[in-house]
Image (tube, rainbow, N blue to C red):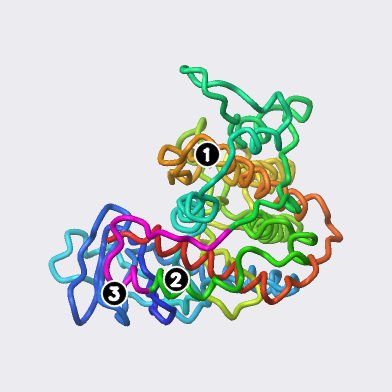
Amino acid sequence: MIREKNQTAFFAHQKRVASILYNPPTTAHTVTHMFLKGAEGKWEVRGCCFKHTAHNEQHMCDVIASVLEKEGMVVGNRSLCLWRYSIPGEPVDVVPKYCGVFETLGERRLSSDLLPGLSSLLPHLLPSLSLSSILALFPPDRVSHTANGQPSILPTWSACCTGGQHKKKEPVNLCHTPLQETPPTFTPEGLSTGLLGEWCRTVYGMKDLLPLSQELLCTHGSVLAALYWRLGWEVGVVSSTLATNGINWGYFFDHNPFEPHCNQHPNNFVILPPGHENLLAPVDFDLAFTADRFVSPYTGTNDQSLFQSWLDSGLTEMERALGGEAVNTGVLTSAKADLSPSHSALEWGLRDTLVCGYREAVSTPSRQAPPPLPPSLRKTMDSLIRLALIVSSRP
């Protein structure tokens, strides 16, 4: 797929790529197996697709854009056309190769960029955090102890998103909990000169935004909790809208009967740049399919019972991934190993809040959008997102 870098640097800093790369007129090189580093403003081909796969992503992008528009949401890729291409000296030249051409609204991802970045910001925003005060926000059955006797919080995904309904614990909702975040007073280690300057400019712009005003403390309590809840709610709106319209994002069993493929995970959301009403937009619909086009791999029929079962499983997998499980995405989304016990406990509280927002959207078919955010709170959220994308930027 071709993507044009038309966003600000922090929202389009990294490019995820497949194994076949082409970037005229300059060369590009892989930094890791997931990332490509190329010159700003250049075009990048994202690996090859079979013709039917490329067609399907274009088609499903348009279908999903149409249903999400009614909910006030957008998709992260806007279909333009298909391109058939070849590479000199390629080993399999008889197989035609295609990629989709899209206009992209964002590139930084929820699981691999924003959530780890927000986690890393916790010591900067709340430098003096009492472990006992955070533990008190959870019911006693969420508190466990490490091998050395240190109290800790059971992870959201295992405590609240695993097992039958009677076994799942209710996630805590930190909205309206006055955490009293303050602007960062020190800079993260290892930032490049360019990122360091952007960090300082963003922090300086927050001096009149944090701590929250008394009015916002009364109505929202914490900008971090409000941000996590909103992120979860937007993921829930997209997920439930697709399910309501009979669209499977890409959950199915293929060659391995014991391990499903699942495209329904948080890293298939990109972060929208400031200026959009929402924070997130979904992407990656090459394997999406609708109820009327579904054919059971077991019976060869349009088995709607199986379709619904897979649809429900996709919703569950999304919730578990939001709760911090990395199996679905393969992305380690928590920086808790680098956090103090108090900040690690708070991170799980924020993960709980993320799941609360998701469940609110998924469980309310006739949902209404939450009240518009106060401008100063939204501006603070945008600043936090920017700082999170700075600290999660890779060299």
Rendering quarter of residue 367 = bottom right
Locate residue 107, reporting x and y percent.
Answer: 44, 68
Give amino acid for label 1.
Answer: Ser
Give the spatial CA distance, label 2 vs label 3: 28 Å
Q: Secondary structure at mark 2?
A: helix
Tell me whether the residue at label 3 lies in contact with that at label 1, contact meaning CB atoms closer than 8 angstroms.
no
Residue underneath mark 2:
11
Residues shaded magenta: 182-197
Seen in the picture, residue 82 relative to 113 is either above or below; the reply is below
Residue underneath mark 1:
344
Give the spatial CA distance, label 3 vs label 1: 48 Å
Q: Residue furthest right?
A: 366
Residue underneath mark 3:
85
The majority secondary structure of the magenta stretch comes to loop
Drawn side of residue 311 relative to residue 272, left or right: right
Q: Residue furthest left?
A: 89
Of tags 2 and 3, which is closer to the observer?
2
Residue located 31% across and 78% down the image: 43
Question: Quick one: 91 or 287, which is closer to the camera?
Answer: 287
Give amino acid for label 3.
Answer: Tyr
Seen in the picture, residue 218 relative to 209 is either above or below; the reply is above
Q: Earlier in the sequence, mark 3 or mark 1?
A: 3
Q: Earlier in the sequence, mark 2 or mark 3?
A: 2
